[in-house]
Amino acid sequence: MRAWHDENSVALDDFELLELRRDDGVRTFHARHIATARPVQVHLLDRVSLPETLALLSRISSLPEQERRRVIDRGVSKGRPYIVTDRLAGFASFREWLESKTPAASLDQQFHDLFEPEVLEPESEAPRDPNKSIPLGAMALGVMVALLFLSLVIAVFAFRPR
């Protein structure tokens, strides 16, 4: 087989795209992992900013563990998100595989997914670094509040009835 290329092709360094199998907004290629010669499928999604693309990406976290293990790699190349999976035999498309293997989302969940896409790397709960500086505006506000409080205390003692 010859490698598939065109002017819009996306270079994924570890994978050789062999044959375009489907293009329904998700371009699915038969491909090969270069280091191991393992046959895989590379799914290139339209754009990360499209709501439908975000909804598809968020469904990956809903896959059962056995199906989630079929996802080999994912990321963004040249501004387009991609997902690499084992060959998804028996499924007409990447969308069909996701829809058949994940529970149907409620309308509320679908709405939530549009605005809260899956976080790929959770934020760490590391303690705050004491050597980091406090923003200048916050420091100025603190000084002003302290001066106002000190002025109020002085006024109370200076103008109290004797």
Image (cartoon, grey):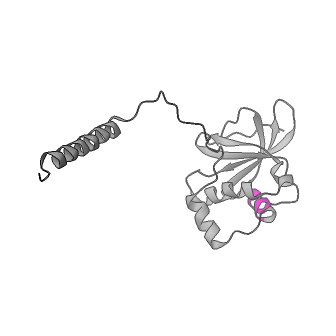
Residue at 56%, 56% in the rendered image: 50
Q: How many labels does the image show?
A: 0
Inspect the magenta stretch and tell me whether residue 108 lies in it. no
Q: Which of 154 and 28 is in front in this view?
A: 154
Residue at 61%, 71% in the rendered image: 108
Q: Left or right: 146 with respect to 74?
A: left
| Residue 54, quarter of picture | bottom right
Inspect the magenta stretch and tell me whether residue 94 lies in it. yes
Q: Which of 61 and 149 is in front in this view?
A: 149
Across and down, in percent, residue 136 comes to: 33, 34
- Residue projecting furthest to the top: 131
Q: In this view, does 148 lie above or below 103?
A: above
Q: In this view, does 107 lie above or below 120?
A: below
Across and down, in percent, residue 125 comes to: 61, 41
Q: Left or right: 143 with respect to 72?
A: left
Quarter of the figure that contains the N terminus: top right
Residue 161 visible at all: yes
Residue 9 visible at all: no
- Residue projecting furthest to the front: 162
Q: Nearer the viewer, residue 150 or 122?
A: 150
Residue at 57%, 36% in the rendered image: 127
Across and down, in percent, residue 32 comes to: 82, 38
Region of the chain picked out in magenta, as a range: 87-99
- Residue projecting furthest to the bottom: 107
Q: In this view, does 138 lie above or below 51?
A: above
Across and down, in percent, residue 134 comes to: 40, 34
Q: Nearer the viewer, residue 145 or 124?
A: 145
| Residue 53, quarter of picture | bottom right
